[in-house]
Amino acid sequence: MILETDRLILRQIKMDDKEAVFEYRSDKETNKYQGSIPETLEEMENFIRKTAKQINEPDTWFQFVLLAKESNKVIGDIGLHFLADDDRQVEIGFTLHKAYQKKGYATEALKSILNYLFSELNKHRIIASIDPDNIDSIRLVERLGLRKEGHFVQSLFFKGEWADELIYAMLKREWR
Ligand SMILES: CC(C)(COP(=O)(O)OP(=O)(O)OC[C@H]1O[C@@H](n2cnc3c(N)ncnc32)[C@H](O)[C@@H]1OP(=O)(O)O)[C@@H](O)C(=O)NCCC(=O)NCCS
């Protein structure tokens, strides 16, 4: 599964990507709102091993890496969670290398992914779950046109305390 945008190639993650992905995913400050931060390359390997082999399998995460065309370097990743109970709904997750943030890469990649999910896979609803303090992620999903549907109060037990969670969503009929 390969998607192409003006500046990026999006392809399935593979074990050979472990060092490149670990380089930015292990950055504790950049990833402070993420559910888990790999501490070792072995943890990174386990993460990659657990990702889905094929796209669109219920109850799995399929992981794309983003390659900058100009350098062929991995600059980030986007995960697609195909929900277990409903095969028309997908949750998205996104991470960029700090050096490649604020250049529009995540927006560019996600536009292509949303288009693929709605137009090719005929998905009905795409959601994102975001920490209310994660301003860059909120700006990203709002830029893409996702709507804020809810603010759950202390709905996640996260790093030893209860954390709030925003749910953003977009329906197929809202995708242009
Ligand atoms: C969430 C995350 C991917 C957003 O990254 P980002 O760089 O802000 O998003 P984009 O790549 O789409 O870049 C958009 C920004 O680049 C700017 N930009 C600069 N050049 C641009 C260009 N050529 N085209 C488009 N935008 C450009 C935009 O103005 C925008 O800035 P703004 O948010 O200040 O308005 C990033 O913050 C991240 O990886 N965070 C850590 C992981 C994380 O928390 N993930 C989410 C868990 S829910």
Image (tube, helix red, strand yellow):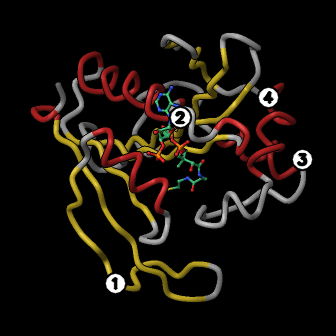
What secondary structure is marked by label 2? strand
Label 4, secondary structure: give it. helix
Residue drawn 53% across the image and 34% down it:
62
Q: Which amino acid does label 1 sit on?
A: Val
Which mark is first along the chain, 1 or 3? 3
Kindly tell me whether mark 2's CB lies below 8 Å from ligand 1: no
Residue 91 image position (x, y, % from top left): 38, 47
**Which numbered disc covers residue 62?**
2
Q: Distance between the residues labelled 2 and 3?
A: 20 Å
Disc number lying in front (3 or 1): 1
Name the kind of residue labelled 2 in the image: Phe
Circle 3 sits in a helix, a strand or a loop, which is it? helix
Q: Is mark 1 within 8 Å of ligand 1?
A: no
Q: Which residue is the site of mark 3?
A: 41
Tell me the crowding category of disc 4: few under 14, some 14 to 19, or many 20 or more residues within 10 angstroms, Cα based: some
- Circle 1 crowding by C-alpha within 10 Å: few under 14, some 14–19, many from 20: few
Q: Percent from the top left, x then y, of residue 16?
A: 83, 25
- The tag earlier along the polypeptide, 1 or 2, is 2
Q: Name the residue under label 1.
A: 153
From the image, tell me which residue sits under label 4. Answer: 17
Name above or below for residue 155 compared with residue 9.
below
Q: Which residue is drawn at 48% across and 13% down?
A: 5
Of circles 2 and 4, which is in front?
A: 4
Judge the density around disc 3: few (<14), some (14-19), many (≥20) Cα neighbours within 10 Å: some
Nearest to N terminus: mark 2 or mark 4: 4
Q: Which residue of the protein is positioned furthest toward the front in this rendering?
A: 102
Foreground residue among 56 and 75: 75
Q: Looking at the image, which residue is at 66% across and 20% down?
A: 67
For the residues marked 3 and 1, what is the alpha-carbon distance in whole angstroms? Answer: 34 Å
Between the C-alphas of marks 2 and 4, the distance is 15 Å
Above or below for 127 versus 87: below
Q: Please report the residue visible at 56 percent of the width from the left and 14 percent of the height from the top.
A: 7
